[in-house]
Image: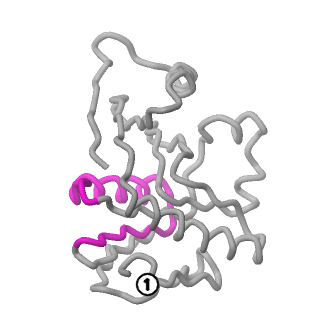
C-alpha cells in the first residue's frame, strides 16, 4: 500500500478530535497519522492482499472466539499510540482486561492503547523500510509481539518487546507464543 504523507503542521495542527472527524467525514480514504502529526493517506490494497488479509483475520477471530482472551481488530481500526501516532495494523489483538479498562468513549473512537499484538502483511507496493519502521514504532509503544509478513521475499520478521528482531525464511507456521496462547497461524494462506 503506497502512502502519501501530507504535513499540515505549518498551517494547522489537528487535535485528536479533529483528526477523528477528518476520518469520519472521508470514510472512503484510509488515514494514519505519524508521531510528528503528519497525515498519511493510504491507498487501498489489491485483491490478492485483501484476500490474504481476510483469511489471516479469520484465523485470529476463530481462535479468539474459542479462547475468549481478548478482542480482535481488522485493518480499518485506528489506534492512538502513546507517542501520539494514529496507526491501523492489518490485524491487531488486545487482551480483554486491557480493552475492558477503556471507557466506552475510548473504545468507540481511536482507542488510546497500543495493542498487545499486531500483524502487517506487506502489499507489493509497500516499502520494506517504512513498514519495518512502523513495526518498530509499535514495539516502542508497548506492543508485545508483532509479525511483519513479506510475501515477496518469503520472510517473516518477528518483533518482540525488549528483544532483537528475528527473521524467519519461508516459515510454514507462526506461534502466538505467550502473547496469543495456543494460537498458530498456518502460512499456507499467505504463501499459496
Residue 9 as seen in the image, left or right of residue 84: left
Query: Quick one: quadrant of the C terminus?
Result: bottom left
Residue 174 as seen in the image, left or right of residue 155: right
**Residue 5 picture location, percent across and down:** 27, 33
Q: Is residue 111 above or below residue 182?
A: above
Task: Say which residue appears at 64% left-offset and 81% top-offset.
Answer: 181
Residue 18 as seen in the image, left or right of residue 9: right
**Residue 185 picture location, percent across and down:** 52, 81
- Choose between 145 and 59: the one closer to the eye: 59
Task: Say which residue appears at 44% left-offset and 41% top-offset.
Answer: 83
Q: Which region is colored magenta? A: 124-152
**Residue 15 picture location, percent across and down:** 50, 20
Task: Say which residue appears at 23% left-offset and 60% top-offset.
Answer: 128
Residue 192 as seen in the image, left or right of residue 72: left
Task: Say which residue appears at 76% left-offset and 76% top-offset.
Answer: 67
SS class, disc 1: helix
Q: Is residue 126 above or below residue 112?
A: below
Q: Which residue is mark 1?
A: 188
Quick check: is 180 in the magenta stretch? no
Quick check: is 143 in the magenta stretch? yes
Q: Within the image, what quadrant is residue 109 found in?
A: top right
- Choose between 76 and 50: the one closer to the eye: 50
**Residue 24 picture location, percent across and down:** 57, 26
Q: Within the image, what quadrant is residue 10 found in?
A: top left
Amino acid at each position: 500500500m503506497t502512502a502519501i504523507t501530507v504535513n499540515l503542521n505549518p498551517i494547522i495542527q489537528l487535535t485528536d478530535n479533529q483528526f477523528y472527524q477528518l476520518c469520519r467525514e472521508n470514510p472512503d480514504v484510509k488515514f494514519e497519522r505519524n508521531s510528528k502529526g503528519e497525515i498519511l493517506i493510504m491507498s487501498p490494497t489489491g485483491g490478492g492482499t485483501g484476500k490474504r488479509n481476510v483469511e489471516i483475520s479469520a484465523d485470529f477471530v476463530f481462535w479468539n472466539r474459542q479462547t475468549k482472551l481478548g478482542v480482535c481488530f481488522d485493518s480499518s481500526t485506528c489506534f492512538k499510540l502513546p507517542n501520539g501516532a494514529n496507526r491501523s495494523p492489518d490485524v491487531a489483538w488486545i487482551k480483554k482486561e486491557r480493552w475492558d479498562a477503556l471507557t466506552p468513549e475510548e473504545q468507540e473512537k481511536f482507542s488510546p492503547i497500543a495493542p498487545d499484538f499486531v500483524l502487517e502483511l506487506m502489499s507489493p507496493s509497500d516499502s520494506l523500510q517504512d513498514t519495518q519502521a512502523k513495526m518498530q514504532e509499535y514495539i516502542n509503544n508497548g506492543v508485545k509481539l508483532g509479525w511483519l509478513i513479506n510475501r515477496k521475499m518469503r520472510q517473516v520478521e518477528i518483533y518482540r518487546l525488549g528483544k532483537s528482531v528475528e527473521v524467519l525464511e519461508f516459515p510454514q507456521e507462526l506461534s502466538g507464543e505467550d502473547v496469543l496462547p495456543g494460537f498458530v497461524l498456518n502460512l499456507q494462506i499467505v504463501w499459496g
